[in-house]
Image (cartoon, grey):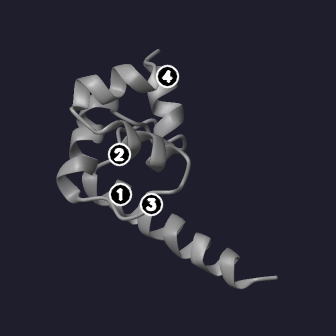
Amino acid sequence: MLRNAREAKGWSLQELQAYCGLPASTANGIENGFVTKIQADTLETLRVALEPQNPETGEIYTLGELYGLMLVREEDSNTTKGKK
């Protein structure tokens, strides 16, 4: 989702990092699924910068919705890791 929102704005990963003041490893790690535990202030910074939209409604996600999506993604990742 982060990559899609960033690309929709026409931003490179470096532009996002510079705009949000994030370390290079953070945004890249989030996009690639390596960073799953994100502080609320970091998530809010990304939300405000990118204004990611819910594809079903076209509305901009709230911080709570994004946090919920991150939790679901983390649960899915943990479930997948346990399967052989």
**Residue at mark 3 to residue at mark 1: CA–CA distance:** 6 Å
Q: Is residue 57 visible?
A: no
| Residue pointed to by mark 4 | 8
Give the camera-side residue of 72 and 27: 27
| Residue pointed to by mark 2 | 61
Dot 2 falls on a residue whose secondary structure is loop
Residue visible at 76% across and 83% down in the picture: 83
Q: Residue furthest left?
A: 41
Say if 27 sits above or below 69 in the image. above
Q: Amino acid at mark 3?
A: Leu
| Residue pointed to by mark 3 | 69
| Residue pointed to by mark 1 | 65
- Left or right: residue 43 compared with residue 9: left
Give neighbour class at mark 3: few <14, some 14-19, many 20+ (Cα, 10 Å).
some
Q: Amino acid at mark 1?
A: Glu
Dot 1 falls on a residue whose secondary structure is helix
Say if mark 2 contacts mark 3, CB within 8 Å. yes
